[in-house]
Image: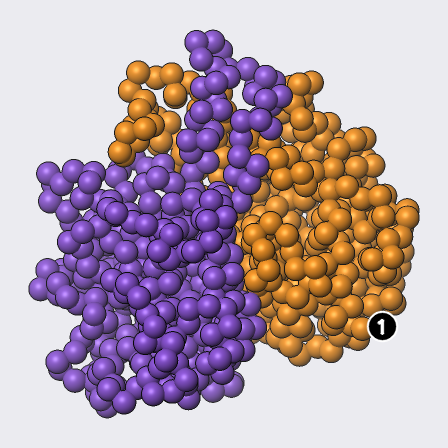
Chain colours: A orange, B purple
Amino acid sequence: MNDVWITGMGIVSPLGAGLEAHRAALAASQCGIRYIHQFPTDRFPVRIAGEIPDPELPHAAAGRTSILLERALDQAFEDAGLDLASASPRRALSCALGKQTVRLETLAAALSAPESDPAAEPPRWPREFVCDWERREPASELDRLARRAGALGPAYCCYTACASGNDALGMGKRLIERGEADVVVAAAADCQVNPLSLLEFDLLDALAQGEPERACRPFDRQRTGFVVGEGAAVLVLESAPHARRRRARARGYLSGYGSALDCFGLTKCHPQGRGAAMAIAAALADAGRRPEEVGYINAHGTGTVLNDRAESAAIYHVWGAGARRLPVSSTKSMTGHLIAAASAVEAVLTLLALEMQLLPATLNYATPDPECDLAVVATPRSAEFRVAMSNGFGFGGQNSALVLEAPLP
Amino acid sequence: MKALRDVVVTGQGWLLPPGMTPASFETPLASDAGPAARQLHGFDAAAYVGDPKVLRAMNRVFQIAAAASVLAMRPAGFIAPADLERAGLVPERCGIATAMTEISPVDANLIDAIRDRSAGEKFDLGAFGESARHRLHPFRRLMLLANMAAAHSSLLFGLQGPSFTFNSGTSSGLQAIREACWTIASGRADLMLCEAADSPQNSLHCHPVTEAAAALVLEAEAVARRRGARILACLRPGPEQPCPSHPRVGEPSSEAAFCHHAPAAAGLLAVLARLPDGRAAAERQQPGSLRETAPGYPPEASAAQARPAVLSSLEIVPCAPDPAALTGPSAALAAEKVGTR
């Protein structure tokens, strides 16, 4: 169960950049949700987000994701003691990249261009507009990242909505288990804090509004929705023999991965968390762990009424009455919901929690919901635990779960 | 290490513009071929997805993906969600592997909304935001997510097992098939539906995109034989070849992708081209894209069928049509099949 080591981590989120910033944020229960600064919001329906407060970053349609990925990758390679200048066919890449978007002003300008005819077959657009889109496609990002990471082996890019990060890590785990790579760079990035994406989420009536630091309240009875965030995480996965040979330090182990579909509806999750429970059970079976060995769950915990209720039901389905004693928190209350990058960022935060032996807080958890009768951690506290779970569930009934373990002493 | 299970193909389906076959898909279109040659004509999504409410939630690329899946699943014996259990399968052990390209958000809905707010004047983001709720489709987000194709197929066939959607460009299709194979071989699922689609209506590309969809039904061999399924081929996933982006040119899937700019469907079509039905236009197939493997596996494979092939480390061994097959519980369901190609 310790065949896949995690030997390096990099993270950029609304809480800051780098592992040290995130250790401090977890310990102090910081909140990265704030008023949006990228564009004027006085007449815009969404005003808060887990925005990375860096005015130098470009728009999501103009390379923001690439920059965040590069920052997280450089951190992860430094943490793993790997050389970015070297390249190897035994190094693979498994990515999850956020839904690509367009800048509305650019689209409006493209529509006014004389050569535009979107009704034609095929549609006609200014060449620069289409080339910009192609340059930012996931396959192009994958190519850039593979070059930067020296990954000459398989290059996977998967998209399973909010479960994408877990699935990228899961695919990486499988590549190592099958002997197809010694090192897998598992990366996820998403920048949905942009006008078009925020409007689309708003139309689903899924977003929480109000005071930034108080808006996101997973598992609380007064919860009203999630807050969109942005960021990137990179985890270096390594086969145990390869890591031992180069005397790498394990930050933890990725011991279990499971995936399952709800098969219930397009917009709503299964009310009893059927697919989520199956994904959790599959991850535990993959890790060879019994439910009672898990000491902490970093929940998907978006803060929507239905999602938190379904996740609670799934946890009860697997743990039974033991669910009341199992510490659960949602770090989305600090970072916002990073969508395709969410579960990769949460995997890093879970591994930091294992390292610090700290149960992170669920911010704004004040009023328990009888339909989410879990041991929700409201304030951070110390605990002894070696095995943790991180959940990621997405639109379309996608569910995936990871089992993460602390390194052996 | 746990012994790996054998994986077989029990269903295949595709939708291609008139005159194309999976085999001919690796041949470039004539240089004077117009856009019409790249598009499906007369496609009626309602023939495959009966529920008009569901159809309204599907964009074109999801519709043709679902249609290809229906074409593949019906002859394999699966028409409605209850058919999995009727065939002795467990829905939790039946999953989906999908290949999709990035779906463009620039659709008619967004174009109309932008034009309404910027006609003859500078685009005003605040005004657009204020009016968005009245102008944009409330579920437009769900029509843009690549994994929603899997969600639709999950609901159509009752699949509740593992699900992965790849959007790795031209590698996506073969990655989906390989991961589906491994998922079955390692015992994590008994059946995986592989599906892929491309449509110019949902993509933004510098080059014209050919509209194409393809699907394969993969099963554990023991499970397929137990239920009397018709076995079309055996698949064996080998180690993934080193596959950085640029050497992809020259791989069979890339040849197809570059010929027709259908990056997601190309990988599945490349496999379909190596199966008996997909070779209808085999004489037009480009040579040099296959590496032969040792013949003779399985023993019933004969020279009259498609040849064994290795495609990006995926070994494909077509099987002889077995007249004794389809005598099990799936036979009655398969007899109900309609409109396969």
- Quadrant housing residue A117: top left
Name the residue carrying label 1. Answer: A321
Instruction: Report x, y in % for residue A252.
Output: 68, 65
Image x and y of residue B236, in percent: 35, 77
Helix, strand or loop at label 1? It is helix
Residue at the location (80% across, 44% down)? A223
Is residue B172 shown above or below A57?
below
Q: Badge 1, how many Cα within 10 Å: few under 14, some, many 20+? A: few
Residue A219 appearing in the image: yes
Q: Residue at x 50, y 48 (%)?
A: B53
Nearest the viewer among A349 and A10 is A349
What residue appears at the point 53 percent right and 44 percent down from the top-left corner? B142
Q: Nearer the viewer, residue B217 or A33?
A: B217
Q: Is residue A212 left or right of residue A2?
A: right
Q: Chain of mark 1?
A: A
Q: x and y percent of residue A154 in the render?
A: 41, 60
Quarter holding the C terminus of chain B?
A: bottom left
Please tell me how many numbered marks the rendered image carries: 1
Say whether residue A237 is visible: no
In this view, the residue in front, A179 or A79, is A179
Q: Is residue A256 above or below residue A127?
A: below
Q: Quadrant for residue B321, please give it.
A: bottom left
**Residue A251 coordinates in the image, percent (x, y):** 68, 61
Specify whether B4 is left or right of A333: left
The type of residue carrying mark 1 is: Ala
